[in-house]
Image (tube, rainbow, N blue to C red):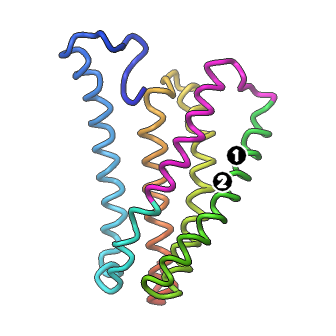
Amino acid sequence: AAGLDEEEDLFSPVPRAARRRALWLGINLATAFLASWVIGRFEATLQQIVALAVLMPIVASMGGVAATQTLTLMVRGIALGQVGVGNLKALFNKETLVGFINGMVWAVVVGIIAGLWFEPKIGFVIAAAMLINLVIAALAGVAVPLLLKRMDIDPALAGGVVVTTVTDVMGFLVFLGLGTWILIGIPA
């Protein structure tokens, strides 16, 4: 479901399948440049604290996986007719709480590891960023498929690109922003 359309299947001719998938790969590339631009805004911080560059993939990966989990459940729920106006608030609340709980658990784990590997302040920075990004991931995982559906874009096709962009951009912004503010003392 990553970049295909409703008519696409395993048996489409190669040129047709490649063309349809290429569109979403191109969109993904553009969004990757957006995430790179955010990282570039923190070049001075990364030059001073290389440990942040080492740990950045953890924040992005965990946020991306968490958002994709929620997105998958939402797309399935939409397809089965289980998601409607009557249960949206409950779904947002539940997924936000799931994101918060997982954020707390994994923030403690990654914070301890990073604190031992580098220093306690860096452990605190990544722990805080992890918590925030997993909550953002949960919210994006619920909101993105609903917004795409409303725009008549199949959330099974475009959702992964969009939630990955949200969690990468926000994860890097929060992590590097907190790192700049807490570790260097410069307003992020």
Magenta part of the chain: 60-86
Determine which of the numbered discs, if any, sits on residue 112 in the image. none
Q: Mark 2 belongs to which amino acid?
A: Gly
Name the one closer to the observer, 149 or 52: 52
Q: Which residue is located at x 31 percent, y 59 percent?
A: 36
Q: Main secondary structure of the magenta part?
A: helix
Looking at the picture, how far across and down is residue 39, in whole percent? 34, 66
Residue 77 lies within the magenta run:
yes
Identify whether 98 is placed above or below 104: above
Determine which of the numbered discs, if any, sits on residue 99 in the image. 2
Looking at the picture, how far across and down is residue 44, in whole percent? 31, 81
Q: Mark 1 belongs to which amino acid?
A: Glu
The residue wearing badge 1 is: 95
Judging from the image, what secondary structure is the residue with disc 2 in? helix
Instruction: Tell me whether the residue at label 2 lies in contact with that at label 1, contact meaning CB atoms closer than 8 angstroms.
Output: yes
Crowdedness near tag 1: few (<14), some (14–19) or many (≥20) residues, C-alpha within 10 Å:
many
Looking at the picture, how far across and down is residue 2, in whole percent? 39, 30
